Image (tube, rainbow, N blue to C red):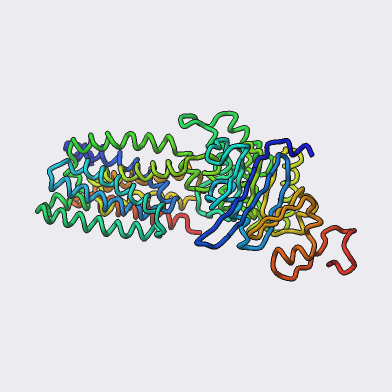
Amino acid sequence: MLEMFEYEFMQRAFVAGIFIAILASISGTFIVLKRYSLMSETLAHSALVGVAVGLVAGYNPLWAAVIVAVLFAWLIEYLRSHFTLYSDAILSIILSGSLALAVIIVSLGGAFNNSLFSYLFGSILSVSYEDVVTIALFGTPALVLLLLFSKELYFITYDEEVAKTSGIKVKLLNFLLVTVVAIIIALSIRVVGSLLIGALMVIPTSAALQYRVGFKNTILISLFFALISVVFGMSLSFYFSLPSGATIVLTVISLFILSLIANKK
Amino acid sequence: MSLKFKVPIFDVKNLSFRVRGANILSNISLEIFNGEYIAIIGPNGGGKTTLIRMLLGLEKPSSGEVRLFGKKLKNFKEWHKIGFVPQRASLVDANFPATVEDIVKMGRVAKRGIFAGFSKEDTLKVEDAMKKMDILDLKKKMVGTLSGGQRQRVMIARALASSPEILILDEPNTGVDMVSQQRFYKLLAKLNKEENITIVFITHDIGVIADDIGRLFTINQKATICNNPKETLSCEEMSTLYGIEAHVISNHKHEHSKDGSC
């Protein structure tokens, strides 16, 4: 079992994967409770536009993905607050629009190849040293911000208007949350892939919610499930030569189903 | 009247609210002073909730001005002085991961600095608010498992945890049974008398509240302010306010007329 750690690429993949599990599960708790689950899917597709630009123009695709995902997150928040559009309609429009844009950029640039495939479904083989550094560089401040404002964000997810009348800066914190989530999603694209990252954000929390425990314990259970899924999923990916995103997601779904059965009313 | 020389908690002048050309509220002016116990009544769609939302800065008025503790809303920073319990607050999402203590603690969040955890003072205030609402024994219970009446007391404890000077409640009895409602009104009166917390609440329980309240605001696009609520609760005025023929059945055991109506 431990022989996989003899390979440097697996060491890199595990460091990146564990960091991503921590980031995705903690931010995912707020996303699920705020009914923003579809937002993670939309931002994952938006990040793909950044990857496409990076691949075609020769920039670091992960950096480009972070920048583009953050810009799209701000665009979604702007549309949500300034136009009379339903939130899920905005997310759906941007999801398909950004995917279409990514495909066109990649097609025009002739970069429709295996490299793009690895960004869609995740690949432990492709996690480079630069990727690990990028994940740590953006992921650390994202995690610090989430933890610093966790009590305020929890209050907002419970009742935005009551939080506002209590003096919490709701607009600013919502803006901060979507920015942090955009960064986390873009960073996760290497390990889990853009088509599957939404699952790593939403499913661990959905499973944890089945245990009907307080906020802190819900986050801890969600974190535990995300870590198990990443470690087990990446091991399966290594031994059976499967895309890591798919094995991670199937593992977390298995944990979700077990949680559902164990907590059936 | 000495009240006139105090700075009002709320000072509302010529407040109007229009949506797509339709007047929801027109030219409302009122003052709310420290220690008052005020009920707001009126028909559905009459603008009661909109008025409360404008007072709290949740809706922007089309014209007019709201001052809170003498300050314009946009300059007001001491939000811990306000405790707000919104409509249907007791109908909390049953799956929301929160214990009673988690919810009541939220009342202290805005008082903390970004880098500070909950202090000993926060813990004491949270315990005190739970004691006042008689929910201390429920503190580790999940909110989703409580009854409507218990949840209602949790929501008020959350508002009390910030040590507010005024408590604003929008139809707090939605989803709450009759016994809990009576207990609730006793609690409100106690908070007003013993803790000197100003109480403003929207209600449809006109008969039940008449005994305790100091002033009554009737809102139906315009505001009528009544300093003697028992006088306002006449058939004629109720009929005008609600736009139907109303019969007021007195709640006072020894004061009602023979047929129980007017």
Q: Nearer the viewer, residue A235 or A179?
A: A179
User: Going by the image, does B192 lie left or right of A179?
Assistant: right
User: Going by the image, does A34 lie left or right of B147?
Assistant: left
Q: How many marks?
A: 0
Residue under the image location 9 percent in, 53 percent down? A110
Which percent across, then down, holds residue B76?
56, 37
Which percent across, then down, holds residue A179?
34, 43
Whether residue A19 is visible: yes
Determine whether A152 is above or below B235 in the image: above
Which percent across, then down, holds residue B138?
62, 45
Which percent across, then down, holds residue A123?
19, 47
Query: Which residue lies most toward the bottom here?
Result: B245
Q: Nearer the viewer, residue A243 or A202?
A: A202
Q: Nearer the viewer, residue B138 or B227?
A: B227
User: Going by the image, does B9 lie left or right of A73?
Assistant: right
Residue under the image location 74 percent in, 71 percent down? B245
User: Going by the image, does A157 lie left or right of B232?
Assistant: left
Q: What is the quadrant of residue B174 in the picture?
A: bottom right
Query: Which residue lies most toward the left here?
Result: A110
Whether residue B180 is visible: no
Q: Nearer the viewer, residue A32 or B146?
A: A32
Quadrant location of the N terminus of chain A? top left
